Image (tube, rainbow, N blue to C red):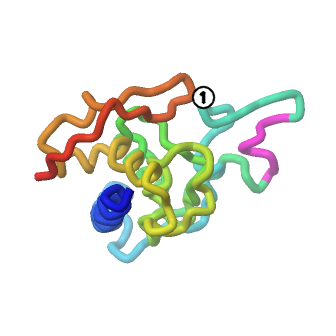
Amino acid sequence: MLVCTKLCHVLTDVVEAEIESFRIQMLQHAQVTTLQPQDTVCNKRMTPNVFKCPTKTICNTNRRGCTFHNSVALSNTRCPTNGMCDSLCKSIIDNHRFKGPSWTNTDATQWCTIAWSIAKCYMPPDGYENVNTAHDADCNGIVNIIINCIKFQNHFKNDLSKYFSLDQKGTVKLRFITRRLK
C-alpha cells in the first residue's frame, strides 16, 4: 500500500507539470488561431455556454428541458474573444483518447488560467467536480488523466491504448499498469 501511495504521489507531480505545460500550449494556440494578443484570456463563458443544446453525451434532456443547460444563463453563447474558448474546447477534445471529456467536472471560465480545470476534463465523470488540485485527487483520478489525455503518452515506452478498455458507462478499466516510465 505504501508503494502505491508513493507511486501516486510521483504521478501527481508529473500530471501537475504536464497539465500546466499543456494549458500554456493550448492557450498560445488559441490566441494565435483567434488573432488575439498574447495576454488575452477568455473567462466569460461557463462550461454549458460553450456547447449548443442538445449535444450528444452532454445534454440530458427530459420533459422539463436539459439538465446541463437548465437556465438562460447557461445557454450557448458566442465567445467574446473571437472563439478562444471554442479553440480550447476543441484542443481538450482532440487530446482526449476517447474524444469524450468530463464536462461536468470542469469550469470553462478557468481554462486559460488554471491548468487543473483542464485536467478535470480527463477524470471520470462522477465524483471529481470539487477536486481543486492534483494533490486533492485520488490515485484513480490521476491515472485516468494519464490514460485519457494523450499528451501523457510520451512519458511511457509502451502504447497506453493497449492497456485499458472502457466499460459501458465510459469509465476506464485498466488491464494492468506498466512500470516502465521513460
Q: Residue at x 18, y 51 (%)?
A: 155
**Given the image, on which type of amino acid does mark 1 rest?**
Lys
Q: Residue at x 52, y 44 (%)?
A: 124
Q: Residue at x 19, y 46 (%)?
A: 179
Q: Position of residue 12 (x, y in %)?
A: 35, 63
**Viewport quadrant of the N terminus:** bottom left
Q: Residue at x 28, y 31 (%)?
A: 163
Q: Is residue 44 magenta?
A: no
Q: Is residue 2 visible?
A: yes
The residue identified by callout 1 is 56
Q: Is residue 162 above or below residue 33?
A: above
Q: Which residues are magenta?
A: 65-72
Query: In the image shown, does 136 or 55 lie closer to the viewer?
Result: 136
Q: Is residue 153 above or below residue 44?
A: above
Main SS, magenta region, reads: loop
Task: Place residue 19 in its image quadrant.
Answer: bottom left
